[in-house]
Image: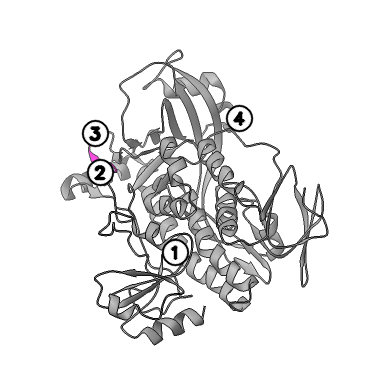
Amino acid sequence: MPDAERIYEVAIVGYGPTGATLANLLGLLGVPTAVLERERSLVLQPRAVHFDGEVMRVFQTAGLADALLPRVRPSGGMRYVSPSGVVMIERQPAVGEGPHGWANNYLFHQPDLENALRDGVARSPCVDVLKGCEVLEVEESNIVRLRTTGPSIHAKFVVGCDGARSIVRQAIGSEHEDLGLHQPWLVVDVVMERDLDLPHPTVQYCDPARPVTLVNVTGRRRRWEIMLMPGDVPERMTQPETVWRLLAPWIRPGDARLERSAVYTFHSLVATRWRRGRLLIAGDAAHQTPPFLGQGMCAGIRDAANLAWKLERVVRGKAGEGLLDTYPSERAPHARQFIAEAVRLGGILQTTDPAVAAERDRRFVETGKEEMVNLSPALGPGAHTGVAPAGEIHPQPRLADGRRLDDAIGGYRFAVLGPRELLQGFEDLASIPVENRELLLLRPDRYIAAVSRAPAEIRQTLQRM
């Protein structure tokens, strides 16, 4: 139990994937951190099921990839299918290593992921985790005081990773930018009791009579997401007899055990303010992404990777607090692009007008299927020069000795890549000789901060951060 009078450098409200990833990264940096979680034990229900290669790269940086690999599996791809069976949109199976040095997409059972993340946090003596500790009030002055159901916590900075109803976002006074999608869906998770010939890839059944998503998760777990239609009563939709009736085209009682059924409204929202003074938000507190691209949790993990190193530089006096303004300026437009694409795909799937659906199907027959690729947009303006490729994430190739680039860099820190003759004088950074003609300054989150042939320009960029 932490000392109630102790002032932490950072307090994290919420211990889901975003909060746990942020705690892992701050722990790597040795930043005294408190994590406050209202639940006393891990929520065992499955929620998120997908993350991409960039997120696995963050887990690699945190030293968790080896622990996660036995608990996840590369994705078998995704298909958007018309009622007549035409594949309109397809994402290929994740085979081999993609640009981030890992498979492009993974599927997982969220409790497995969260256990691995929490095991990682337990390695960090500078991180205290308070479970069963709900934040009741946020008082901000020179130090933030969190009044909780347990001890009062004092911290220099507070990050709300506390979900869609975030108390920290409320304290910031942030509204939402609405990208226009609000649709209730029934989510059903099952554990198969016997083998059936179910699709291996994720399938989006674009049927105007009732759109449905089927996900082959991990092991014997399967998920159906079933769109609510006019006249559906949400309370009745979760009843077993209704669930089995809706699953009848694929499975019947005895084929599987129902693990969870719940109605969720899929939203497309971005908070208008991500920071006020010493208060910040991340994950679902900052943005909500429809699931049609599988990027909701990924956005929160990217938030954590972007924010942790900036917090460390500020609390250690290496940078002024203005560096924290680059967190929302970079992340908000980046997240918005993923949300907009998810809304576009949701529009294709959620078409319920038969005439509009017929026109949609005809258009895809004429033009052929669309290939879905993982988005990799540049960051918004912030802690980089803004001259491309600065602001873009650097790929993770394997080096001549077989190591992945990030393993050669080691940990969560800055690095300089370039020809050997230009690397002299960068002994204080991870200096990796590569066949570039220029020097690249990589941030701890592996985004490019600057590109130049002049070592002095690289050093100046680093000093401004």
Q: Are marks 1 and 4 in contact (CB under 8 Å)?
A: no
Label 4 environment density (alpha carbons within 10 Å; few <14, some 14–19, many ≥20): few
Distance from Cα at disc 1 to Cα at disc 4: 36 Å
- Mark 2 residue type: Met
Q: How many marks?
A: 4
Q: Secondary structure at mark 1?
A: helix
Residue at image mark 3: 85
Asked if the magenta segment contains residue 94, the reply would be yes
Disc nearest the viewer among 1 and 2: 1
Residue that mark 1 sits on: 334
Depth check, front residue: 315 or 359: 315
> In the displayed structure, does residue 114 sit left or right of residue 431?
right
CA distance separating discs 1 and 2: 26 Å
The image shows residue 134, relative to residue 43, as above or below, that is below
Q: Which comes before the other along the chain, label 1 or label 4?
A: 4
Q: Judging from the image, what secondary structure is the residue with disc 4 in?
A: helix
Query: Which residue corresponds to mark 4?
Result: 235
Q: Which amino acid, mark 3?
A: Gly
Tell me the amino acid under the disc marked 1: His
Q: Which residues are magenta?
A: 85-95
Query: Which residue matches tag 2?
Result: 88
User: Label 3's element?
Assistant: loop
Q: Nearer the viewer, residue 53 or 289?
A: 53
The quadrant holding residue 391 is: bottom left
Q: Amino acid at mark 4?
A: Glu
Label 1 vs label 4, nearer the camera? 1
Let me know if residue 91 is in the magenta part. Answer: yes
Please report whichever mark, 4 or 2, sits nearer to the chain's N-terminal start.
2
